[in-house]
Image (tube, rainbow, N blue to C red):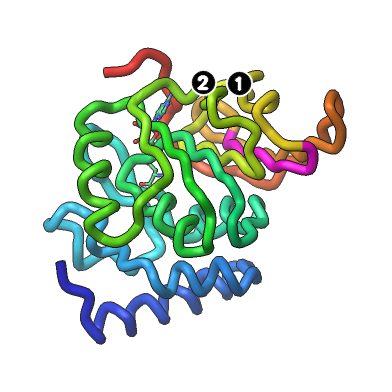
Amino acid sequence: MKDTHKHKGLRNQLVSTIKNKGIEDENVLNAIAKVPRHLFMDSGFVDFAYQDKAFPIAAEQTISQPYTVAFQTELLEVKNGDKILEIGTGSGYQTAVLIEMGAKVYTIERQKELFKKTNLFLPKLGYAPKRMIFGDGYKGLPTEAPFDGIIVTAGAPFVPKPLLAQLKIGGRLVIPIGDDTQVMTLFIRTADKKFEKYELGNFKFVPMLKKKN
Ligand code: SAH
């Protein structure tokens, strides 16, 4: 597991690219500059790690595009020490970005193969989540709720009610909603039964699926 001077240089270029695309939060940009994305990819794709593109990982899933990771993370407004729930661990790249920003991360993955792989890999890299769960993200994680933020990294056909219920007052849920393409949607819980909703542009994600396998 090597992170060289060259990789760091490529990461700085990637940071410029996503800055030009509109990401402003310095904490997000610093985290992208630090997390060695090439180590989260299968060896055949390592040369592409610092292009602003999604790429295949195991089990027909993808590592999200860096701009998308940055966009979702910016919407979460992560502060040091925040308790964050992530649905869709995948490669663990988004998880590492959140941990780099000082978040305590709980992350759920429904694919056994990916769960096992990332569960071993993240701590080795020094990015240990609070908990990694093999389970169904539609249910959230009621035993650890409430959360300052919840981020869904797969395309959801609708907003799962348990996720809204597991937000603190003032908490934020960032979720791409839709079937073929998704609308990035931000919910802010402003009171016990009150939510603000914002729609923030179209994205393309792998689908959020029910049932584990
Ligand atoms: N955050 C990841 C993105 C992975 S793609 C990364 O940075 O690499 C989305 C992930 O969501 C896939 O790994 C997929 O298996 C997972 N997923 C899909 N439906 C899910 C569900 N219901 N619960 C938990 N994870 C789910």
Where residue 44 sits, quadrant-wise, is bottom left
Q: Quadrant of the C terminus?
A: top left
Residue 110 or 56: which is nearer the viewer? 110
Give residue 144's position: percent from left, percent from top: 55, 31
Residue position marked by numbered label 2 in the rendering? 138
| Labels 1 & 2 near each other (Cβ < 8 A) | yes
Which one is nearer the viewer's eye here, 18 or 195? 195
Dot 2 beta carbon under 8 Å from ligand 1: yes
Query: What amino acid type should be assigned to the residue bearing mark 1?
Result: Pro
Which numbered circle lies on residue 160? 1
Q: Residues within 10 Å of mark 2 (few under 14, many from 20)?
A: many
> Does the stretch in magenta take in 173?
yes
Name the side, left or right, on which 59 lies relative to 50: left
88 relative position to 60: left or right: right
Q: Position of residue 46 (x, y in %)?
A: 19, 63
Name which quarter of the figure residue 45 lies in: bottom left
